Image (cartoon, coloured by chain):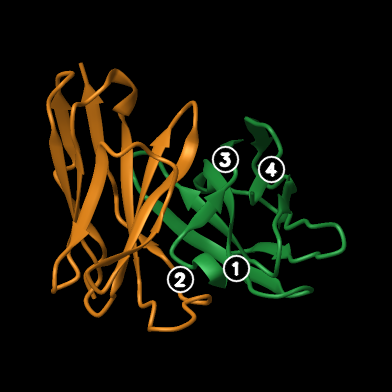
Chain colours: A orange, B green
Amino acid sequence: KAGVTQTPRYLIKTRGQQVTLSCSPISGHRSVSWYQQTPGQGLQFLFEYFSETQRNKGNFPGRFSGRQFSNSRSEMNVSTLELGDSALYLCASSLATSGSSYYNEQFFGPGTRLTVL
Amino acid sequence: GDSVTQMEGPVTLSEEAFLTINCTYTATGYPSLFWYVQYPGEGLQLLLKATKADDKGSNKGFEATYRKETTSFHLEKGSVQVSDSAVYFCALRKNTNAGKSTFGDGTTLTVKP
């Protein structure tokens, strides 16, 4: 079974631009979560999508948004990039059957390394 | 809110030494607890998990026991190898917010031959 894939792996943008990152979950997985990893703040939860609906959201400004498609693939978008947005963005997928997804393991992709200049 | 605290690193050990990485958590309810490992340039891999008090998770020689009385989930390995060098993250998840994992800051382990 193919793992979680993220594209692109590396991105360089300048301040003020916007960026879209893509995540393809493991086949059959319906939940996709996004995390930002930085040396200063560690791993922080951005949001989770399940069946095309945002189910949970972290404490990030509205410049960070996402969506999920009917095939469970997800994209996240960051508008008006700031230097502080430079980070590794990780997505994770899980089966997350409706109801409690408590025990479902999250499988992480390799991440997209975003550098904002 | 929920939080996870890991022992500060980095940790440097000689091969075959005993490893302990401390992890404590603060959370309401009954979270599941996890240890993840991250190798350079890669995402996170689940190392082990425990879903209720007194559960012991184990994998590849690593172990951790869910201690509700001390709100801890310390990672141990009896004999580390050079290949264990990586960053280790302790995390919790709750079924009231199951898509969200709360992570500790990570502990960098370097094992020298």
Which of the pair A91/B96 is nearer the observer? B96
Of residues A92 and B113, the one drawn nearer to the viewer in this rendering: A92
Q: Position of residue B33 (x, y in %)?
A: 63, 63
Q: Are marks 4 and 2 on the same chain?
A: no
Residue that appears at 39% across and 83% down: A98
Q: Secondary structure at mark 1?
A: strand
- Callout 1 amino acid: Lys
Residues at marks 1 and 4 on the same chain: yes
Judged left or right of residue A115, residue B74 is: right
Q: Which residue is mark 1?
A: B49
Q: Nearer the viewer, mark 4 or mark 3?
A: 4
Asked if residue B44 is positioned above or below residue A68 in the image, the reply reads above
N-terminal of the pair, mark 3 or mark 1, is 1
Q: Quadrant of residue A93?
A: bottom left
In the rendered image, which residue does mark 2 sit on? A105
Amino acid found under the numbered disc labelled 2: Glu
Question: Pointer 3 indicates a residue of which chain?
Answer: B
> Which label sits on residue B106?
3
Q: Residue furthest top?
A: A117
Q: Position of residue B8 (x, y in %)?
A: 68, 32
Q: Are marks 2 and 3 in contact (CB under 8 Å)?
A: no
Of labels 4 and 3, earlier in sequence is 4
Q: Residue at x 58, y 67 (%)?
A: B94
Chain assignment, label 4: B
